[in-house]
Image (cartoon, rainbow, N blue to C red):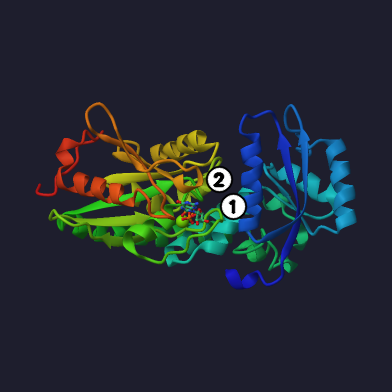
């Protein structure tokens, strides 16, 4: 609901360091998440702790510091880079005397902002309802008046008026609608299978450059931006590659992130299932990101959750223009393509990728995929 963000949202951000090795990256990611949600950051408050305080997460000293800052800056919102329990949320709301949201709510909000398709909107609403239902008690009572505020988009504004039964009914209804869409998708997929199309899905961490690569390959014009979760809906396009008979359909998908809210994975199951049914995955990695290894692990973890861990993968090391890396293909000792260095932005290395796709299309049996692949002439 982009139209609901007329006034800029300002907030104080809170990020606590519990000694995790990826803390710096997580903090950077948090800032980008806030920016992606359209938040104007008034201040970033940091601190070190051994473990979360059960009552207020941040501990009483930090909460005092925060309260003073919130008052001084007249901050209408505080966002935590962590997941808060309903009790913590309630205690913090009381102590800070302002609205408080956690990382999951922030991500859900970005999703609500970005959902374009009917299915995407239903999925986001379902995830929001499930999440908020478990946390009704932690919500600030004035949320009803803050309809345009971050964290209150989507079903948030009407939630407090709904009793639990109505809420459950809505969840059942949403599930039914999504199930119908899923069946429809299956029918489409069957006809696509019959027409012997090679389906290739672009997957990867958010902001890795998936949509830029998709546009580069298909000459499409899907939204690509330096934002987290710029893409929410799966887009598919036919890809023409010279030589060979079989057709290729390429899909751009939603990006993954560490600590992806659990309900979100469930809500996006049907879209992600599409990924799980692909013949080949192009796993796009921001080669320039110091956390690229852990980002790849995170992506593979989600792929496993949706049953896509056995699909052949080509790793795409993207953004080589930023590092001055050479474009090219890396193969293993059997000649199987492991990874390709390229720049979706400048186009360097794209020819190598097109050649790799043609190779996979025309001689899939020469690749040693983890699961038996159905040759096109099967
Ligand atoms: N320098 C450089 N920047 C790139 C390259 N590819 C993508 N980008 C930039 O990276 C940012 C993210 O690109 P997207 O294509 O939107 O990334 P995405 O993986 O689709 O992101 P989400 O949809 O948000 O998950 C944009 O600012 C792109 O311009 C590249 O090869 N080189
Ligand atoms: Mg994208």
Q: Which residue is under mark 2? A: 261
**What is the quadrant of the N terminus in the image?**
bottom right
Q: Is mark 1 on a helix, strand or loop?
A: helix
- Vertical position of residue 35 compared to residue 87: above or below: below
Choose between 38 and 188: the one closer to the eye.
Answer: 38
Q: Which residue is drawn at 72% across and 54% down?
A: 139
Crowding at label 2, few (<14), some or many (≥20) Cα neighbours within 10 Å? Answer: some
Where residue 83 sits, quadrant-wise, is top right
Q: Position of residue 209 (x, y in %)?
A: 46, 52
Q: Position of residue 67 (x, y in %)?
A: 87, 48
| Callouts 1 and 2 close, C-beta under 8 Å | yes
Q: Residue at x 64, y 29 (%)?
A: 20
- For marks 1 and 2, the one nearer the N-term is 1
Front tag of 1 and 2: 1
Residue 107 is labelled as 1
Q: Distance between the Cα atoms at labels 1 and 2?
A: 8 Å
On whether ligand 1 comes within 8 Å of the CB at mark 1, the answer is no
Say whether residue 346 is left or right of residue 188.
right
Residue 312 is labelled as none
Most extreme residue toward the left, as rendered? Answer: 377
- Vertical position of residue 157 compared to residue 98: above or below: below
Q: Where is residue 68 in the image (x, y as percent from the top left)?
A: 90, 49
Q: Which residue is drawn at 30% across and 62% down?
A: 237
Choose between 131 and 303: the one closer to the eye.
Answer: 303
Q: How many labels does the image show?
A: 2
Say whether residue 315 is left or right of residue 153.
left
Q: Which residue is drawn at 74% across and 45% down?
A: 14
């Amino acid at each position: 609901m982009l139209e609901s963000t007329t006034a800029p949202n300002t907030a104080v951000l809170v990020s606590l360091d519990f000694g995790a090795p990826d803390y710096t990256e997580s903090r950077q990611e948090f800032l980008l998440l806030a920016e992606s949600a359209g938040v104007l950051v008034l201040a970033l408050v940091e601190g070190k702790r051994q473990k979360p305080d059960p009552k207020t997460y941040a501990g009483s000293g930090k909460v005092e510091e925060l309260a003073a800052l919130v008052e001084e800056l007249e901050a209408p919102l505080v966002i935590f880079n962590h997941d808060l329990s309903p009790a913590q949320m309630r205690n913090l709301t009381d102590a800070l005397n302002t609205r408080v949201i956690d990382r999951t709510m922030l991500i859900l909000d970005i999703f609500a902002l970005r959902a374009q398709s009917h299915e995407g909107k239903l999925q986001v609403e379902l995830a929001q309802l499930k999440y908020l239902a478990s946390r009704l008690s932690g919500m600030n009572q004035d949320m009803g008046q803050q309809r345009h505020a971050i964290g209150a988009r989507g079903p948030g504004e009407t939630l407090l008026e709904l009793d639990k039964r109505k809420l459950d009914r809505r969840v059942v209804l949403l599930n039914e609608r999504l199930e119908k869409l899923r069946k429809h998708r299956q029918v489409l997929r069957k006809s696509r299978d019959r027409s012997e199309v090679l389906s290739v899905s672009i997957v990867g961490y958010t902001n890795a450059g998936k949509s830029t690569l998709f546009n580069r390959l298909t000459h499409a014009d899907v939204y690509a931006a330096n934002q987290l979760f710029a893409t929410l809906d799966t887009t598919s396009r036919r890809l023409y590659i010279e030589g060979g008979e079989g057709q290729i359909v390429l899909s751009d998908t939603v990006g993954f992130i560490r600590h992806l809210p659990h309900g979100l994975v469930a809500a996006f199951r049907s879209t992600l299932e599409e990924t799980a049914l692909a013949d080949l995955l192009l796993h796009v990695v921001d080669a320039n990101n110091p956390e690229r290894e852990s980002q790849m692990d995170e992506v593979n973890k989600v792929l496993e959750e949706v049953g896509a861990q056995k699909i052949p993968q080509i790793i795409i090391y993207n953004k080589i223009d930023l590092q001055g890396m050479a474009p090219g293909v890396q193969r293993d000792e059997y000649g199987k393509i492991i990874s390709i260095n390229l720049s979706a932005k400048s186009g360097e290395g794209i020819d190598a990728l097109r050649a790799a796709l043609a190779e996979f299309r025309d001689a899939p049996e020469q690749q040693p995929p983890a699961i038996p692949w159905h040759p096109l002439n099967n």
